[in-house]
Image (cartoon, grey):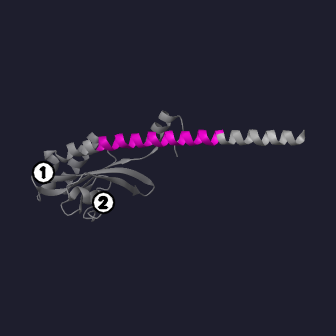
Amino acid sequence: IAAILVAVVIAVGTVIHGSVRTEIANDLERSRRTFEELQGYRASLFRAESRVVSEAPRLKAVVATAEISRETILGVAREVQRTLSSDLFIVTDAEGFLIVDTSSPAAEGHALGARAVVKDALEGRDGSGVWLDGTRVHQMVSRRLSFGASTVGALVLGYLLDDRVATTVAEHTGNHVV
């Protein structure tokens, strides 16, 4: 009888263990799909925003005009950033050197042209990627700033991948996201 009881306990344990593993795997897969769908939606929205902003005459004019002060460029950039609610708003010149970063107003002249998201924009492609900023992660998009065929710079927008995104995924899947 003891042998039968041990066999039953082992069999039940195996079945329960397999069932739990399957349930966890299904939950993880559902969370992954939801996160990918959310990121795809966010990327589409951010690309559309960057397209609209990169065509804004005022922004292109302040970037392309040599006589404009940094304070004026920063003011225009902050105004546009508030409208978008982006977490990062960066503008480079045609060579990829930093003109303005609203999160670091004193910064200028840093070479950003080698970063893929900036390089893509300067070469006329919509750029996208992820940037790490200390412990924060940003979903990035970029777009070329141009007058006709002349490239005058790159617009780089960043949006935090933070607790808000994790909470949204958790609400849609019923699972917590780390």
Q: Is residue 150 left or right of residue 9?
A: left
In magenta, the rendered stretch is 19-46
* Residue at x 50%, y 37% (from the top left corner): 170
Q: Residue furthest left?
A: 148
Magenta-colored stretch includes residue 44 = yes
Q: Nearer the viewer, residue 156 or 4?
A: 4
Q: Nearer the viewer, residue 149 or 85?
A: 149
Q: Can residue 32 be seen at all in this image of the molecule?
A: yes
**Amino acid, disc 2:** Ala
Query: Separation of disc 2 and disc 1 at Cα?
Result: 25 Å
Which residue position holds label 1? 61
Which residue position holds label 2? 116
The residue mark sitting in front, 2 or 1, is 2
* Residue at x 25%, y 57% (from the top left corner): 120
Magenta-colored stretch includes residue 25 = yes
Q: Nearer the viewer, residue 155 or 70?
A: 155
Q: Which mark is residue 74?
A: none
Q: Earlier in the sequence, mark 2 or mark 1?
A: 1
Q: Is residue 113 left or right of residue 132?
A: left
Please provide percent x and percent y for residue 75: 22, 49
Please provide percent x and percent y for residue 112: 28, 62
Q: Can residue 68 be seen at all in this image of the molecule?
A: no
Q: Tell me if residue 9 comes above or below residue 74 in the rendering.
A: above
User: SS at mark 1?
Assistant: helix
* Residue at x 15%, y 57% (from the top left corner): 152
Q: Residue furthest right?
A: 1
User: SS at mark 2?
Assistant: helix
**Amino acid, disc 1:** Ala
Q: Is residue 112 left or right of residue 29?
A: left
